[in-house]
Amino acid sequence: KSVPLWLPALLAVLLWAGFAFAWSFAVTGDSHDDGEETFRAILQAVDRSDMEFLIHTGDLVPRDGEREWRRLREATAPFGKPIHPAAGNRDGSGPEARKRFAKRFGLPGTEYSFTRRDARFVVLDNSGGSLSDRSLAWLDRELASRPKGADGIAFLIVVMHIPPAAGTLIPHGTRPGYDEQCGKLLAILQKHGVDAVLSGHEHMNHTEDWDGILLVVSSAARVPWLPLQRRGFFRIVLEDGRIREVFLQVDPRK
């Protein structure tokens, strides 16, 4: 029996519509010090929502120890959605620590990429306080391998633990030359039309425009002595070729 002539056209319209509708995911980081139970509250809020997964921008544990990783597994066990992590400075240092991190999450390494719907995510490892030439070259190649407009890709998003030295941000714990490295990073991002950079490390929830790129810093942990801090995380919404962030507050006491 022949296929109706209108069926391929209908399937194409439905496929297009699936990409046209808005979808979203969550981003947070720095769950290493969750004495206020903020991270657990974030996990519960994301699990109850239509957000499809959680990006964790690193510092998942206080230090790279089995007890700490066990506590994290216990905290995330009830969570029913994927978690895509970046390596943080507290998650270990050195080649063996990076290998352990990748093995824990079933990753090819601490630098990797994945695609969800019409978005391509590239995760960098700058947990050591720098952006090496090797990492920047890998990022350039990775973004070029799946450019916007190819295979339905409409968004390019980069994830890394330490935010770039950009705008009002002066990240702590970076090595000499980080500002210059961030200049090289910006050139690569603009070359490929990257839409957003997601990071953590600074124990704050903050956004700004970095020369046309959405820069998001999100952390479950807070600075104890700093007043008027927001407790929560960001919902990232992708719709009709546009990306935007929405801050969602959580109350661990509820």
Image (cartoon, rainbow, N blue to C red):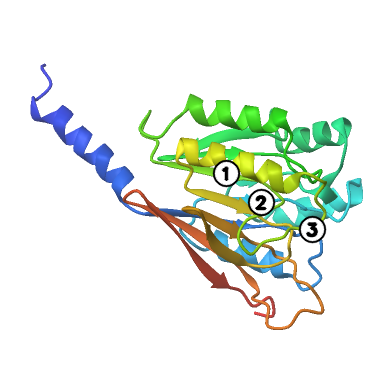
Looking at numbered disc 3 in the image, what kind of residue is underneath it? Answer: His
For label 1, the residue is: 186
- At mark 2, the secondary structure is loop
Single out the residue that lies furthest toward the top: 1
Q: Is residue 218 above or below residue 100?
A: below
Do residues under tags 2 and 1 come within 8 Å of each other at their CB atoms? yes
Mark toward the start of the polypeptide (2 vs 3): 2
Single out the residue that lies furthest toward the left: 5
Characterize the local packing of mark 3: few (<14), some (14-19) or many (20 or more) Cα atoms within 10 angstroms.
Answer: few
Looking at numbered disc 2 in the image, what kind of residue is underneath it? Answer: Pro
Q: Is residue 67 above or below residue 246?
A: above
Residue 249: x, y in percent?
A: 58, 74
For label 2, the residue is: 164
Looking at numbered disc 1 in the image, what kind of residue is underneath it? Answer: Leu
Q: How many marks?
A: 3
Mark toward the start of the polypeptide (2 vs 1): 2
Q: Which residue occupies 56% across, 25% down?
A: 141
- At mark 1, the secondary structure is helix
Quadrant of the drawing holding the N terminus: top left
Cα–Cα span, label 3 and label 1: 19 Å
Characterize the local packing of mark 2: few (<14), some (14-19) or many (20 or more) Cα atoms within 10 angstroms.
Answer: many
Cα–Cα span, label 2 and label 1: 9 Å
Q: Which residue occupies 9% across, 25% down?
A: 4
**Looking at the rendered structure, which numbered label has been put on residue 172?**
3
Question: Visible in this render: residue 80?
Answer: no
- At mark 3, the secondary structure is loop
Quadrant hosting residue 152: top left
Q: Nearer the viewer, residue 78 or 134?
A: 134
Question: Visible in this render: residue 189?
Answer: yes
Horizontal arrangement in the rendering, residue 226 relative to residue 63 (left or right): left
